[in-house]
Amino acid sequence: MAELYVKPGNKERGWNDPPQFSYGLQTQAVGSKRTPLTKRVAASQDGSPRVPASETTPGPPATGLPPPSNKAPRPPPKGSCSTYSVEPTSSPVIESETLLEDVLRPLEQALEDCRGKVRKQVCDDISRRLALLQEQWAGGKLSMPVKKRMALLVQELLSHQWDAADDIHRSLMVDHVTEVSQWMVGIKRLIAEKKTLSSEEEATEEKSAATTEESQTVPGFLGAL
């Protein structure tokens, strides 16, 4: 590039004389690279000024990183591993309260079945024991195991499972004697009386069925003769 800025050497000058620079060559080289400021941009047909393409389309940032996105980050898909932790919700197991009516009503009905067929003194004693049971239950003096076993005892009583009901009565007397001692005697007597009445009713029904069958067989036998 030095030949553009330096004139041809003078043969009459010494070897150590400085070279003579050409100002015209320098202005020509510099002027060829600059854009003349007097150049105008033609207006567009719609009246809005045109902007050079180099100004409307910016190049990539100097850092080389992609431009930031305006879209909000999406949450991770369901079931994928992420930093969100889901704690298992544990619902407490609520133990249902045995109602007093569900236990006392069947016992009172069994006592009504015994009246007129069992001695009045026995029925009155059972009624007094049931009143103690109701009083202690309503007063919150009975524990949950006692209430549950009494509910099971009533179910066995209604199903005429006398031995199972007697076993539950015995377990209550062994495990919770301090809670049930005042009224469990009446429950035991009620089970025994109800069992006796049921056995008598079954015997009466069997006898009646046998009599009916015999009465139907005899006329047929006499007619055959």
Image (cartoon, rainbow, N blue to C red):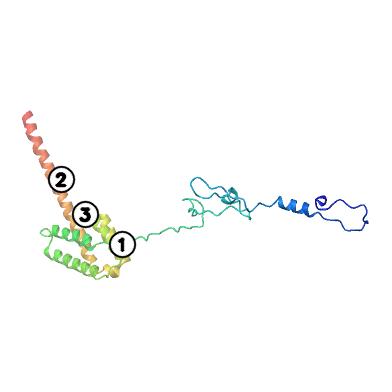
* Residue nearest the observer in this picture, 156 or 117: 156
Mark toward the viewer: 2 or 1: 1
Marked residue nearer the N-terminal end (3 or 1): 3
Q: Is residue 60 above or below residue 122?
A: above
For the residues marked 2 and 1, what is the alpha-carbon distance in whole angstroms?
34 Å
**Residue holding disc 1:** 171
| Element type where label 2 sits in the image | helix
Label 3 element class = helix
Q: Amino acid at mark 1?
A: Ser
Location of mark 3 (residue) = 158
Characterize the local packing of mark 3: few (<14), some (14-19) or many (20 or more) Cα atoms within 10 angstroms.
some
Tell me the number on the disc at residue 126.
none
Which of the image's four quarters has the C terminus?
Answer: top left
Tell me the amino acid under the disc marked 3: Leu
**Left or right side of 36 for 15:** right
Spot occupied by residue 207 in the image (x, y as percentages of width and height): 13, 45
Task: Give me the disc on residue 206.
Answer: 2
Q: CA distance from mark 3 to mark 1?
A: 19 Å
Residue 122 coordinates in the image, percent (x, y): 15, 64
Residue 151 locus on image (x, y percent) = 26, 59
Q: Is residue 141 above or below residue 34?
A: below
Q: Do labels 3 and 1 touch, CB within 8 Å?
A: no
**Separation of residues labelled 2 and 3 (CA atoms):** 21 Å
Of mark 2 and mark 3, the one earlier in the sequence is 3
